[in-house]
Image (cartoon, helix red, strand yellow):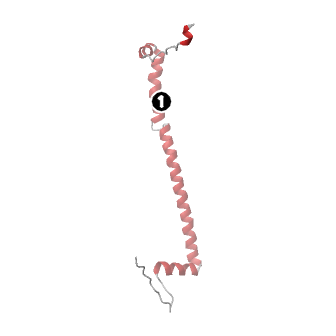
Amino acid sequence: MESQYYRTLRKRFDLSRLLRNKRILVATLIGFPLLLYVLFGSHGIVQRIRLERQKVEVEASVKAAEEENLRLQAETKALESDMKALEKVAREKYGMVREGETVYKVRRNE
């Protein structure tokens, strides 16, 4: 009756028992290095996760480059056909003016 009130002690890990049981020993000697290879090898799970993350980053970079390319193509097309766009670039980037216009430069006092 008293035994139901006491906690039973668990057996601790016994290395000598493991060494005596040949099947467990062989399975451990083969399984542990195999597990390490599957996790950390050159084609392992950790490498796969790293490559997947790198793939996502590269795909995002490619998408950004494609969007930039489309923007530049649209700008090129506008400069080839639209005279107002060409004039705007000439005025802003190169500081060009029409005949008879006077340019005033304003300096800020800071």
Q: Position of residue 98 (x, y in %)?
A: 51, 88
Q: Is residue 96 above or below residue 16?
A: below
- The residue lying toward the viewer, choosing from 15 and 86, is 15
Residue linked to disc 1: 35
**Quarter of the N terminus within the rendering:** top right
**Quarter of the C terminus within the rendering:** bottom left
Judged from this view, the residue extending furthest toward the top is 1
Q: Amino acid at mark 1?
A: Leu
- The residue lying toward the viewer, choosing from 64 and 12, is 12
Secondary element at image label 1: helix
- The residue lying toward the viewer, choosing from 9 and 14, is 9
Judged from this view, the residue extending furthest toward the bottom is 100
Q: Is residue 102 above or below residue 47?
A: below
Quadrant in the rendering for residue 17: top left
Q: Position of residue 10 (x, y in %)?
A: 49, 16
Q: Is residue 22 above or below residue 98?
A: above
Q: Position of residue 19 (x, y in %)?
A: 42, 15
Q: Residue at x 54, y 81 (%)?
A: 87
Q: How many marks?
A: 1
Q: Position of residue 105 (x, y in %)?
A: 44, 84
Q: Residue at x 46, y 82 (%)?
A: 95
Q: Residue at x 45, y 26 (%)?
A: 32
Q: Is residue 50 above or below residue 97?
A: above
Judged from this view, the residue extending furthest toward the left is 110
Crowding at dot 1, Cα within 10 Å, few <14 / some 14-19 / many 20+, comes out as: few
Q: Residue at x 55, y 8 (%)?
A: 2
